[in-house]
Image (cartoon, rainbow, N blue to C red):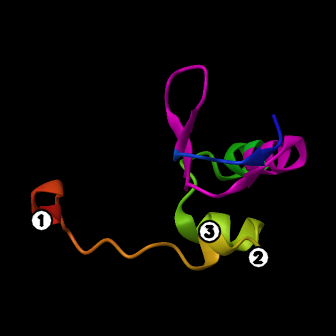
Amino acid sequence: MAGKLSEPKIITDLEQQVVCLLPTGFYFDDNRWDKIWQEYESKGDTLSMADLKTLFPNEPTVQNPAEDKGETFSKCR
């Protein structure tokens, strides 16, 4: 299960509540899985990008996320 994500991953709890959204390229393993769940249980709410930045200070995909400029696929033509 360890490795870099090839697409964004939404983690949900048993009630289908969003735990967090992990970006493409995020290195994911069992230790990180445990850290995410511990933080989610502690916070009691969805983890934000700011939460992920704190949890994973050396992970470039959360430290320097892509900027959303509101562009749509129609602008790619």
Quadrant of residue 63 in the image? bottom right
Report the quarter where the C terminus lies: bottom left
Looking at the image, which residue is at 87% across and 40% down?
30
Magenta region: 9-36
Q: Does the segment drawn in magenta span residue 26?
A: yes
Kind of residue indicated by mark 2: Pro
Label 3 vs label 2, nearer the camera: 3
Dot 3 crowding, Cα within 10 Å, few <14, some 14–19, many 20+ = some
Q: CA distance from mark 3 to mark 1?
A: 25 Å
Indicate the quadrant where residue 47 lies: bottom right
Q: Secondary structure at mark 3?
A: helix
Using the rendered view, name the quadrant where residue 62 is placed. Answer: bottom right
Residue bearing the label numbered 3: 61
- In the displayed image of the protein, which residue is found farthest to the top? 14
Q: What amino acid does circle 3 point to?
A: Thr
Left or right of residue 34, residue 4 in this image: left
- Front one among 76 and 17: 76
| Residue shown at 60% from the left, 20% from the top | 14
Q: Are marks 3 and 2 in contact (CB under 8 Å)?
A: no
Q: CA distance from mark 3 to mark 2?
A: 10 Å
**Residue depicted at 83% across the width and 45% down the height:** 29
Observer-nearest residue: 26 or 75? 75
Magenta highlight on residue 25: yes
Left or right relative to 3: residue 64: left
Give the residue pinned by disc 1: 75
Secondary structure category for the residue under label 2: loop
Quarter holding the N terminus?
top right
Q: Which residue is mark 2?
A: 57
Answer above or below: position of 66 versus 30. below
In this view, the mark in front (1 or 2): 1
The residue mark sitting in front, 3 or 1, is 1
